[in-house]
Image (tube, rainbow, N blue to C red):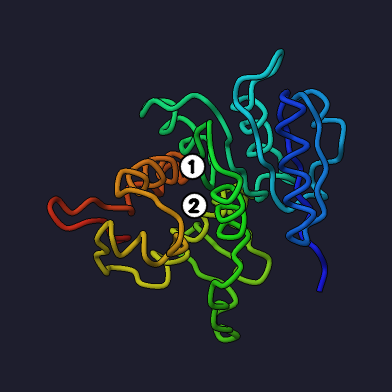
């Protein structure tokens, strides 16, 4: 089985050494760089996960993540922020950028390793094959299930993994109202600790990217969300 490749981006060299030791021991291929600028020189599309510090000299981790999520070759790469910025506003900003998880310093290495395992999807049940549903669509909104791409009126758009999975769920069950907890259970791994507020943040981000099709993603007060034409 091919090893997952992980890049650690943090200006604390001792911390990088500790993380690399544990990642290698767990069977991952892992490398470290000490600035966001250095990370941009590494061909980030080759990595399966980034462990990303937020506060670094020069470009911040938030800014690096924003660049990743805008590029067609790297938008899908999961990001776990490792940071001392622990306010609710900081956490929500991290998730709004597209983070798959957010771990505050100081942390235990065991916690980080558990988050890495969860984000990379180990132990998650495989998605059932759907050969009869090659595409999911609603007017000019088209999702290609095989290539994991979404187009709006013929133009390719970049979505994070969670945004894609939410949209896929809605398109597969048009008209069904999902509670926030149902969305958490369907899209987020069971061993990742997230709140219902995370759903709201991701829905808001999804609506923004859907542009004029955002009107189809409807809030049902007191119940949840549904996708309705």
> Which residue is under mark 1?
209
Front position in the image: 82 or 146 = 82
Q: Is residue 190 visible?
A: yes
Separation of marks 1 and 2 at Cα, in angstroms: 9 Å
Front position in the image: 32 or 224 = 32
Q: Is residue 8 above or below residue 59?
A: below
Residue 179 on image: x %, y %: 24, 61
- Image quarter (top left, top right, bottom left or bottom right) of the C terminus: bottom left
Residue 22 on image: x %, y %: 73, 50
Q: Quadrant of residue 34?
A: top right
At horizontal 66% and vertical 45% (from top left) the residue drawn is 75
Is 6 on the left-hand or right-hand side of 206? right
Q: Is residue 181 above or below residue 212?
A: below
At horizontal 34% and vertical 69% (from top left) the residue drawn is 174
Residues at badges 1 and 2 in contact (C-beta under 8 Å)? yes
Which residue extends farthest top? Answer: 58
At horizontal 56% and vertical 86% (from top left) the residue drawn is 132
Q: Is residue 229 visible?
A: no
The label on residue 163 is: 2
Mark 1 lies on a secondary structure that is helix
Q: Decide which of tag 1 and tag 2 comes sooner along the chain.
A: 2
Q: Quadrant of residue 69?
A: top right
Q: Is residue 8 above or below residue 155?
A: above
Tag nearer the camera, 1 or 2: 2
Is 212 on the left-hand or right-hand side of 149? left
Mark 2 lies on a secondary structure that is helix
Residue 220 on image: x %, y %: 18, 54
Q: Quadrant of residue 32?
A: top right
């Amino acid at each position: 089985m091919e090893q997952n490749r992980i890049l650690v981006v943090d200006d604390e060299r001792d911390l990088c050494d500790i993380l690399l030791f544990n990642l290698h021991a767990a069977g991952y291929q892992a490398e470290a760089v000490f600035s966001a600028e250095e990370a941009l020189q590494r061909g980030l599309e080759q990595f399966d996960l980034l462990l990303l510090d937020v506060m670094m000299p020069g470009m911040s981790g938030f800014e690096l993540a924003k660049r990743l999520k805008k590029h067609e070759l790297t938008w899908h790469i999961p990001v776990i922020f490792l940071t001392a910025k622990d306010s609710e506003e900081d956490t929500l900003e991290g998730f709004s950028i597209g983070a798959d998880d957010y771990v505050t310093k100081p942390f235990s290495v065991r916690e980080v390793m558990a988050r890495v395992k969860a984000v990379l999807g180990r132990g998650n049940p495989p998605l059932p094959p759907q050969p009869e549903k090659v595409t999911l669509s609603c007017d000019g909104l088209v999702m290609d299930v095989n290539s994991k791409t979404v187009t709006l009126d013929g133009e390719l758009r970049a979505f994070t993994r969670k945004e894609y999975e939410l949209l896929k769920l809605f398109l597969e069950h048009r008209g069904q109202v999902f509670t926030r907890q149902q969305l958490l259970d369907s899209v987020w791994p069971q061993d990742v600790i997230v709140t219902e507020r995370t759903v709201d943040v991701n829905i808001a981000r999804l609506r923004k990217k859907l542009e004029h099709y955002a009107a189809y993603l409807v809030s049902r007060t007191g119940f949840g969300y549904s996708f309705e034409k």
